[in-house]
Image (tube, rainbow, N blue to C red):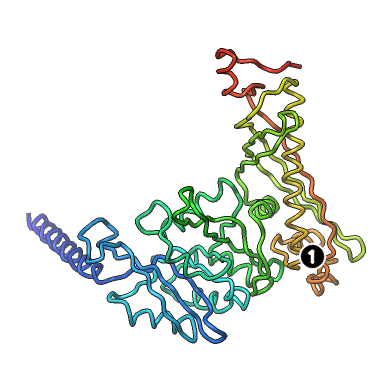
Amino acid sequence: MKKLRGLCVILEICITATLFQGCWDMREINELGLVMAVGIDKKGEDEFSVTVQVAKPNEAGGGNKGPSGEPIWVGTADGKTIFDAIRNVAKMSSRRIMWAHNNIIVIGENVARDSITPVVDFFTHNSELRMKTWIAVVKGEARPYIEAKTGMESIPALSLARLFKYGELPAKSIKSDMLTVFRDYKSDSQQPIISQLNMVTNASKKDTQVELAGSGVLKDDKLVGFLTPDETRGINFVREKVKSSVVSVALTLLNNKRVTVELHDIKTKIKSTVVGDAPQVVIDINAIGEITEQDEVSNVSIDIFKKEVENLIQAKIKGDTEDAIKKLQTEFNSDVVAFGRFVHIQNKEQWDKTLKYKWNETFKKTAVKVDVKINIDSSSLYQIPIQNEKANGGEKVEGKDK
């Protein structure tokens, strides 16, 4: 009985302590402002401008609304350094600013072209910040992206962060977080590539939305240019960062109407050789495709139709990939595809002897060949689209078989 009474007393103390702890937390959270997104811009030559999107927890959670009724507050401050500017934000905030929940860092073009070193330095040294925070670069200033009320979430920063999650579907953007950018920033064999955000006008042409498409290419610590969304997808194929993708092409067999193919089971192999001091890289991209949409009737056989679609999809992926690599070699001289790493691993003797000392110059001259093989594997491929079935009285009309 004494042991039982003792256990009951201990249990009562634990429950009471937990209840008091909960009240203390609630009292604290109402006094906090949680940074959800931050934008870094340059103001003149010697100053940074920092814009923060701050969530007010009690209002963002659907509780009592404050005077403004807004779940977020956006503030901007300037300073000689990023840390100085962030400290100056506190001068205008009525709540204690916390950074542990920050979702995304947006870097303005002027900062990125000057150097991302101050950004990397601050956000990797601050123990309150997470290395898995998303990071993106924009054309122009970062501030409008932090101020924009975009997406379907009550807190716009959450919408921005979720773009990275669902951006895998079109595969036309880069999933870059501070950890991967820092890794490539410190690497001797790969240059950094960062996600790009764009401001677009929605269908109503009244409001703007933020989209994740394209990428910013860096040389060492400086932004040197941007890749288009299609070129970015080509780089993703090379970097084996594509799980699935959708590609649309126009067919002469369909009077230049379009066919859409969903790709999956995507595999990429990179093989490098060195002849003398000249590296050669061969990229093999293989994928399975399924036709998901067809906008016009075709009377050719299914085999001929499939072959035509395969050829056009292969040419599209090959062209986008080659365009991207050419831009990396001739315009940017930035090895974001890690060809240097493959040459190092697969040709270690030549790398250690000469190539590692002059890879910046050698990368521009490296011969690259891209081979793409797409296999259309549709279990139910009809040679007449559904809108034309209706015109034929609901009867499915297939093309000639083998």
Where residue 296 appears, x then y in whole percent? 66, 27
Could you tell me which secondary element the residue under label 1 belongs to? helix
Where residue 304 appears, x then y in whole percent? 77, 25
Task: Please tell me which residue is depicted at 56% across the width and 45% down the height of the picture.
Answer: 169
Task: Please tell me which residue is depicted at 62% across the width and 37% down the height of the picture.
Answer: 262
- Return the residue found at the far right: 276
Q: Nearer the viewer, residue 28 or 39?
A: 39
Task: Please tell me which residue is depicted at 62% across the width and 60% down the height of the picture.
Answer: 215
Q: Is residue 349 left or right of residue 289?
A: right
Q: In the rendered image of this protein, does residue 150 appear above or below residue 375?
A: below
- Return the residue found at the far front: 205
Q: Which residue is mark 1?
A: 330
Q: Quadrant of the N terminus?
A: bottom left
Where residue 383 appears, x then y in whole percent? 67, 22
Where residue 138 appears, x then y in whole percent? 56, 66
The quadrant holding residue 86 is bottom left
Q: Amino acid at mark 1?
A: Thr
Q: Quadrant of the C terminus?
A: top right
Q: Is residue 92 left or right of residue 111?
A: left
Q: Nearer the viewer, residue 106 or 395?
A: 395
Q: Nearer the viewer, residue 386 or 116?
A: 386
Task: Please tell me which residue is depicted at 59% across the width and 55% down the height of the picture.
Answer: 173
The quadrant holding residue 34 is bottom left
Q: In the rendered image of this protein, does residue 173 appear above or below residue 246?
A: below
The quadrant holding residue 399 is top right
